[in-house]
Image (tube, helix red, strand yellow):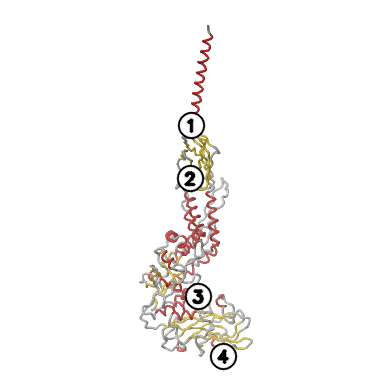
Amino acid sequence: MSRSPAAALLAAATVALLTLIGTPTAASLSSTELDVPGDPLLIELTNVNPAVLPDQGRLRITGILRNVSDDTWREINLHPVLSAAPITDRVELAEAALSDPRQPVGDRITSIGNFASVELLAPGASVEFTLRVDRDALPVGNQAGPGVYWLGVHALGANQDGRATVAVGRARTFLPAVPADAADRVEASLVVPLRPPVRYTSDGAVADPEELTAQVDVARIEGLATHSPGRLSFLVDPALLDALARIGAGNPDRWPAVVEEDPQAEPAPEPEPDLAHLDALVAAFGDHDVLALPYGNLDLAAAVQYDARLVEAALLLGDATMQHYGVPSLPVLAPQALDRVLLTALSGAPVLTTDDQLDVEGPVPTRVRVAGREATVASSGAAAGGPGPGDATDMVGLRQRLLAEAALRLADETPQPLVVVLPETWSGSDRPRQFFAGLRHDWLDWVSLTRVNDDEATAIPTTSLVLDATSALRAEHVAAFVELTEAAEVLQSVLTEDDELAEVILAEAMTTLSYTAAPEVSLDMLRRAGDQVQQRLGLVTVDAPSYGTLTSETGRIPVTVANGLDQTVTVRLEARAEAPLEVSTGDSIVIGPGAQSTVLVSVRSPIIGVHNVEFVLTDENGRELGDSARLPVQAGQVSQVIWVVIAAGAIFFVVAVVLRIRRRRRRVP
């Protein structure tokens, strides 16, 4: 339908009320926005103010209109859309968020002054727009029922084929309605996850340090912490802090190549570590709560299946790490899938799960007791964000869905707290001021997760656990982890001046058992690192003669221990001898870098014969390093044989002399 000249003049006048930029802006398209084929114009909502249905005044909607087609669009009208009836329960809200973007959700508001116009939009161009909608123009009346309304924007326009009869661009979100005299209040808690994948090379350097640093946007974290209306709860993988510290120290390999230096030259000063990124992150936590995950964001399903001790080890390592960096924290377990076996096997740390892992009749309580354990349940719906076709978790989509979930809880007899774990990579965190400004309401109390954890739990049956806690990690991953960490403990125990190596390698290895670990890459890293540790242990060697002989019942045999490492080692020489051979190797041996030491081993054998003895290098706790030397020892009471021979010879000599004297005497007349 074509417009009248009067309507065209009105549209031109409306343009003066808008901020319209006819050139491409810096805002980018998300893949989600392209999921509606055929729409030549895309609409991104940048704010809704107020974020709930106002009692009076105007509703202000801002956004960006983009032309993603090859056509030039003209005479574009942007109309607000609002549903006449509200959504009144959480199931209906979840269905609405997943509904087809082309499904009608309400009527366009076409009254003068409540829509905006764009005269021309070239291919690839974008413009910002503002809609100011009178409260009286909304189709819900002055006494809107409590619940959640659809709010949208439709774009209608013309191209070279004429004027479109349907919307050629659309955006949708939710607009909660809360009575001004609402007696109840809803507690809400926001959890900010900081658990990006942390990976190490087999040499101990952080893999992809630039990518990891980029994922930890301290400016955004500071913005969230500064503008939040209440205490946030940061869900932190302690391994992240260690990785940032290593990157700040230059991200060195564990065993850098030894470079021969000029002995006359002045030693180069050690570079000062740049810990600005880490320090800024720790400072951003401020007075907010920090919840420490098991170190490396441990795959709890794999740990419980193969070695449940890993859970306690990861919790202890995580707690020690947070203390090391001066970050007060509380432990928490956040399994990606929850079943009875996993839940009953976990330690006593608080459990954080999501409602999509539970199947109960009616709304899922925020605090539950199941299989003998209590858990706090976060809303998967709120974290999923708003409806399409736009980015579901942009600032507007996530905020409006969060408010909608909270508003519907007011209908409960006793409103349940709302817990929301923000998306891991959240595009809306770059506008924290606007995000949180729309979340400040008298009926909404923002509290920390630890406060919610104090609430009484509702018992639910074990059959409510609908998922199986499975893992992509296999038994061989845990076996390789154990082999590496045990070898690292042995290596550290022989390094006289290094008391951190085993803990460092343990921490690096723990990240390979993460929920975010790539199984094959992790297994390769564990095996390579294990080989490197074994190679280092193999540089401490023992050498013995090819054959040993005792010239008496006791004797000494020289055994040489060589240190091929560039660090001082302390080892013990252990002898495993065949009976009745007795071997004493003495005390611990301290050997400097690149040096060797010869030990005179005491040997005793009361019985004649050849007996074998094996010399093995161990640490001071008796754990083997790997190298050994085998020595056959010829043992016999050689001194007794000699005396027998000498005595027999003497007797023979005396007898011969006596006989010769007698013969001579007989010959004398």
How far, Cα to Cα, is label 4 from label 1? 125 Å
How far, Cα to Cα, is label 2 from label 4? 93 Å
How far, Cα to Cα, is label 3 from label 4? 38 Å
Crowd tier of the residue under label 2, counting other residues whose Cα lies within 10 Å: few below 14, some 14–19, many 20 or above: many
Instruction: Say which residue label 4 marks.
Output: 9
Label 1 or label 3, whichever lies nearer to me, is 1
Q: Is residue 278 visible from the viewing direction of this image?
A: no
Label 2 or label 4, whichever lies nearer to me, is 2
How far, Cα to Cα, is label 1 from label 2? 33 Å
Instruction: Say which residue label 2 marks.
Output: 571
Residue 211 at x, y = what percent? 54, 65
Q: Is residue 564 above or below residue 191?
A: above
Give the position of the N terminus as an image quadrant.
Answer: bottom right
SS of the residue under disc 3: loop
Q: Amino acid at mark 2?
A: Val
Q: Is residue 214 above or below residue 268?
A: below
Mark 4 and mark 1 in contact? Answer it, CB < 8 Å: no
Instruction: Say which residue label 1 marks.
Output: 637
SS of the residue under disc 2: strand
Instruction: Say which residue label 3 marks.
Output: 393
